[in-house]
Amino acid sequence: MPQRLHFGQALIDGCWAANVRIAVADGRIATVEPGVAPERGDERHAIALPGMPNLHSHAFQRGMAGLAEIRGAGDDSFWTWREVMYRFVDRLDPEMLAAIAALAYVEMLESGFTRVGEFHYLHHDRDGRAFADPAQMSRAIFAAAAESGIGLTHLPVFYAHAGFGGAAPNEGQRRFIHDFDGYARLLDTLRAAATCDLPDAIVGVAPHSLRAVTQGELAALAELAGDAPIHIHIAEQVKEVEDCVAWSGQQPVEWLLGHADVDARWCAVHATHMTNDEARRLAESGAVAGLCPVTEANLGDGIFDAVPFLAAGGRFGVGSDSNVLIDMSEELRWLEYGQRLAAKGRNRVARAPGMSSGQALFDGALAGGAQALGVVGGIALGSSADVVSLDAHHPSLAGKPAEQILDAFLFASGRAAIDCVWRRGECVVRGGRHRARDAVAERYRRAIAGFDR
């Protein structure tokens, strides 16, 4: 018999419906019935939201949260942070990676993220040589996803060069580097493994950045992807933009749009530094802008200019990237707050008078994130039963009509209002706490305590 959940209110296709019963069978939504009273056997809750996709994560970086907040000599920037990251990654083994990723994924689920795009570039052993099983580090990610229950879109990264124009990689990148044939074999292995290990995993393709691949490699990677997602870091840092202009005479997004068949499969991660013309053209391509406001603030990247991109019909999603802080509501709130700080105005993502900022943020990130991760998002027939319930007794939600729930959740209560999270119909978070939190956190503590810094 299908599992039945009943909600006093549920967000369906961007609209609030009252008294909604959802039946779940084989991990998917079998029926959605609005306007019906609860029946005996229904599990009853107050407020339902669709689970949110997290379109960009480097799970291993959860283990270095707080390690890069000491000011160094000279101009402290993304590039000095990267040196800390290289030192950290030098010490990771598969067991440690699995422990760190499991905690990251538990925290994602507790904050309302139900699927993650894992942009995974840590492939090789500490000396840079391939493991006997070249997919060993990815299998650690698969194990963490299985343990936590989170949906996984795995994005193995192709990383071949240290700079624009095919520059030779440096020593700090030795654990990331592939030749094309080796990467193609890895991709085949991962596609087969994902089918066996996880019920609805997707394996996409991720050229790391324009500085890490050549034009020929980029074209070949797009061919390897087929219909699967293609994610690329782009235009994150001012120096990256300057280096791209020096190499090609064009800005990164401009170059990408002129030299690759960018379409709805693509996710341009960060895309922080674009001209208005680049923003318009990226929007017209159908690609998703993958925004990570907490990480972009932590690294000092700059602020994505959302207004011209959204005005041109641009699609966006959010990700937790470096996982320095994992919180879905925080990513959405800071997406809006960044726009307000830059423009010295309010309610910037909402595009029309009377539009709710919370609704604009949530609906946009849900649709764009699902597209970027290759799934159908939302509470809909046939989609994965990935649902988040809010605690209607939280003070910030008290007395709020349906049309103000998302504003109160994102701007006032945040993750403290999350009660339960279902993933493929299975309740993995109850009372705001993941069912495996204690065991996962203890294993993480052991892994970090034995970490040689």
Image (tube, grey):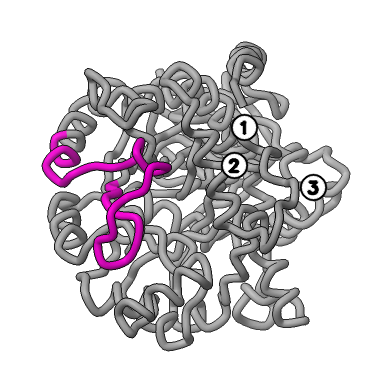
Residue 368 appears in view: yes
Q: Which amino acid does label 3 sit on?
A: Ser
Is 184 in the magenta?
A: yes
Q: Choose between 440 and 369: the one closer to the eye.
A: 440
Which residues are drawn in magenta? Answer: 158-185
The residue shown at (32%, 64%) is 210
Q: How far from the left and from the top, in percent, is residue 333?
A: 69, 59
The residue shown at (37%, 80%) is 246
Instruction: State the mark number for residue 323.
Output: 2
Q: How far from the left and from the top, in percent, is residue 74?
A: 69, 61
How many angstroms separate mark 1 from mark 3 (CA)? 17 Å
For disc 1, the marked residue is 107
Q: How far from the left and from the top, in percent, is residue 11?
A: 58, 51
The secondary element bearing badge 2 is classed as: loop
The residue shown at (48%, 30%) is 423
Q: What residue type is labelled 1?
A: Glu
Q: In which quarter of the image is the N terminus?
A: top left
